[in-house]
Image (cartoon, grey):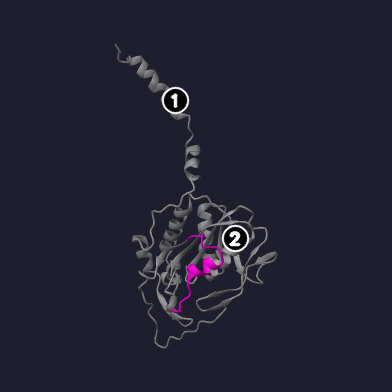
Amino acid sequence: MKTAPSFCLLLSLHHNISRRCSSIKPRRLFSAIKSSNYINMSYEQDGAEAKEIAKYLPYFPFKGIPKFYDIGGFLENPEVFQQIVDIFAARYDSIGIDAVAGLDARGFILGPPIALALKKPFIMMRKKGKMPNSISSADYNVEYGKRAGLTVQRDKISKGDRVLIIDDLVATGGTLSSAVSLVHLCGGTVVECACVVEIKMFIDPPADSGLPSRTKLFKDMDINHVPVWGLISEDVLTVEAKLEEGYVDDGEEH
């Protein structure tokens, strides 16, 4: 006949378990959680936070584009800018990256605070002729013209590095494709391409639409395995900029 365990035995077991659990360092436990290599999916495209931020992204007729989204709207609002940095830092804090690469030029505004929040190096990907000791990707097309390839300094990305690419907006994907090519040329891996705004109409438009397809571009370049994420899409970007009388579209190719 089995007997119930004595009070002394239960007390001894409780003491041993408590002593073992207390030996687990909080920092070690936190490190284990952080190295789990997953993306934090708490923030959805066009979610509640995105819809609030969208109020600070007005559009202008600019460079011949009817709706040119201007990040200057949220840059002048520190609380909104900080919220964007916090959202991106939270998304990538646990995935395990080695560096953050920002694209010339608005990626130089968004990338550094995100890299600082993640405590990771920031890498500039610049237009040709701007940096010494650099390598270049091939020329590429964007929604309003053709561009020379981006460049990165040769010693900034090592073989096997996991790189997060940051820019303000993705439309046709030409600039991002150039950046992805650079990372691959250096032997690195692109964890994700992340932008504040994603224009979804260019993801995979009908063949007879006449619109460039980002999906086709990435497939043709054999980089269709690289994920792209945008916090806000054109679906919720409905704020039209208030233009003064006599406004002129003075956008130039540069």
Q: Quadrant of residue 221?
A: bottom right
The residue lying at 54 percent from left, 63 percent from top is 223
Residue kind at label 1, given as amino acid type: Arg
Which residues lie in the magenta part? 209-227
Q: Identify the residue position indicated by label 2 in the image.
A: 123
Query: Is residue 84 in the magenta section?
Result: no
Position of 158 relative to 141 (above/below): above
Residue lying at the far bottom in this picture: please name it.
246
- Residue at point 45%, 54% (across, down): 91
Question: Does residue 216 belong to the magenta stretch?
Answer: yes
- Whether residue 106 is visible, yes or no, is no
Residue 65 falls in image quadrant: bottom left
Which amino acid, by three-letter code, is at mark 2?
A: Ile
Where residue 232 sits, quadrant-wise, is: bottom left
Picture residue at 40% right of the left edge, 54% below the top: 41
| Residue 225 rendering spot, x and y as whole percentages | 51, 59
Mark 2 vs 1: CB contact within 8 A: no
Please tell me whether residue 234 is drawn above or below residue 96 in the rendered image.
below
Query: Residue 28, position in %: x, y?
Result: 50, 37
In this rendering, position of residue 6 left or right of residue 183: left
- Determine which of the numbered discs, if any, sits on residue 19 in the image: 1
Q: Look at 38% across and 53% down and name the residue there.
A: 42
Residue 207 got which mark? none
Q: Earlier in the sequence, mark 2 or mark 1?
A: 1
